[in-house]
Image: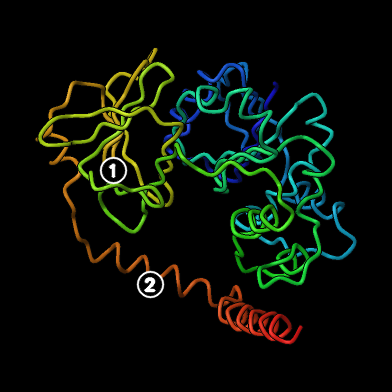
């Protein structure tokens, strides 16, 4: 089955964009459609297709999906519009069986090892996280985000009418899948790193083994973690480095075949023991990180964070009242 993953970015590219490109390059059976206004000359792999698109042009594509004026004033808000990619970019996706979303703050492993044809035949949507999700390329799934309902979670018309980030690409669309009994494969193979920690701790699927780093090796991604002073290895689909600055300390990136991913650096590959992993992942508490957390919350206020919280509470109480009085 043919898969297309849509990525977008506006402005200066992340400092480790070349490492993202390298991890995409090794997934030769998947096409990456990269929409951007960046004009840097970059040697893109054959399966990564750069498509120049201004932010205004992207907004126009989403506007054509609905019959009311949308609110889309900054690139980050596009995350709420990702469930509409299949409809907005339908002209680019005609030859594909599945389309999906892929962010740039990832290092990808061997996608098709985890997303087999058997899985694609069994589910209409694979995974629940907005940074990496697949949808069957059918009319039903392209228009799934347009589902109207009276449930306590967001509808598309509510999401597309506010600057506030509603996480519709996760909470909203996945609850619609549950509501309509859409076949949905839950996350089982991602390393989603908690951005509120200085060290590497996974969210959602974290186990008791928190002494851990990652290794990318010839298209494969491995978690290396300590169990009783021994280093264990587990292959994973991706690592998500959300809101995390990563320094690149790779000495020779020409014909790069492998590298280490540690907090908060990319390093030349080498064999590591349990003590080194513990040292790499030692917790560090900084006032700067706490300050940034406060800044993020303050920034949300003019975007409508307080109004949206009251709105959701009101909606939830209304739904509960209707349910109790049926």
Element type at mark 1: loop
| Residue drawn at 57 percent across, 18 percent down | 45
Residue at the front extreme? 326
Disc 2 to disc 1: CB gap under 8 Å: no
274 lies left or right of 213:
left
Q: Is residue 93 above or below residue 113?
A: below
Element carrying mark 2: helix
Residue 219, compared with residue 56, is above or below; it is above
Whole-percent x, y for residue 72 in the image:
71, 60
Q: In x, y percent, where is residue 319?
A: 70, 79
Q: Residue at coordinates 30% horizontally, 62% vertically from top-left?
A: 289
Nearest the eye: 263 or 247: 263
- Say which label, 2 or 1, has the lower sequence index: 1
What label does residue 264 carry, if any? 1
Q: Residue at x 73, y 40 (%)?
A: 53
Q: Please, is residue 206 above or below residue 20 in the view? A: below
In terms of image quadrants, where is residue 314?
bottom right
Image quadrant in which the C terminus is located: bottom right
- For label 2, the residue is 294
**Horizontal and vertical percent position of residue 152:** 67, 73
């Amino acid at each position: 089955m043919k898969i297309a993953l849509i990525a977008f970015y506006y402005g200066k590219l992340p400092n480790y964009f070349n490492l993202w490109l390298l991890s995409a390059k090794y997934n030769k059976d998947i096409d990456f459609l990269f929409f951007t206004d960046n004009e840097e000359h970059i040697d893109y792999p054959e399966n990564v297709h750069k498509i120049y698109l201004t932010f205004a042009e992207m907004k126009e594509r989403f506007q054509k999906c609905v019959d009311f004026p949308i609110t889309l004033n900054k690139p980050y808000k596009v995350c709420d519009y990702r469930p509409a990619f299949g409809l907005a970019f339908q002209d680019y996706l005609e030859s594909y069986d599945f389309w999906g979303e892929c962010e740039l703050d990832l290092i990808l492993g061997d996608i098709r090892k985890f997303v087999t044809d058997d899985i694609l035949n069994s589910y209409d949507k694979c995974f629940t996280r907005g940074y990496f999700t697949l949808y069957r390329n059918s009319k039903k799934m392209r228009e799934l985000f347009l589902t109207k309902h009276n449930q306590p979670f967001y509808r598309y018309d509510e999401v597309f009418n506010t600057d506030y980030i509603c996480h519709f690409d996760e909470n909203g669309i996945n609850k619609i899948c549950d509501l309509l009994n859409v076949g949905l494969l839950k996350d089982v193979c991602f390393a989603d790193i908690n951005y509120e920690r200085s060290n590497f701790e996974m969210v959602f699927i974290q186990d008791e083994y928190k002494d851990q780093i990652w290794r990318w090796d010839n298209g494969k991604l491995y978690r290396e973690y300590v169990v009783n002073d021994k280093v264990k290895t587990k292959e994973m689909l991706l690592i998500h480095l959300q809101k995390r600055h990563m320094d690149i300390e790779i000495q020779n990136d020409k014909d790069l075949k492998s590298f280490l991913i540690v907090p908060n650096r990319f390093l030349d590959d080498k064999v590591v023991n349990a003590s080194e992993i513990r040292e790499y992942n030692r917790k560090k508490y900084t006032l700067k990180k706490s300050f940034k957390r406060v800044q993020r919350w303050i920034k949300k206020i003019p975007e409508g964070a307080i109004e949206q919280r009251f709105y959701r509470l009101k909606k939830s109480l209304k739904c509960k009242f209707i349910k109790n009085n049926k």
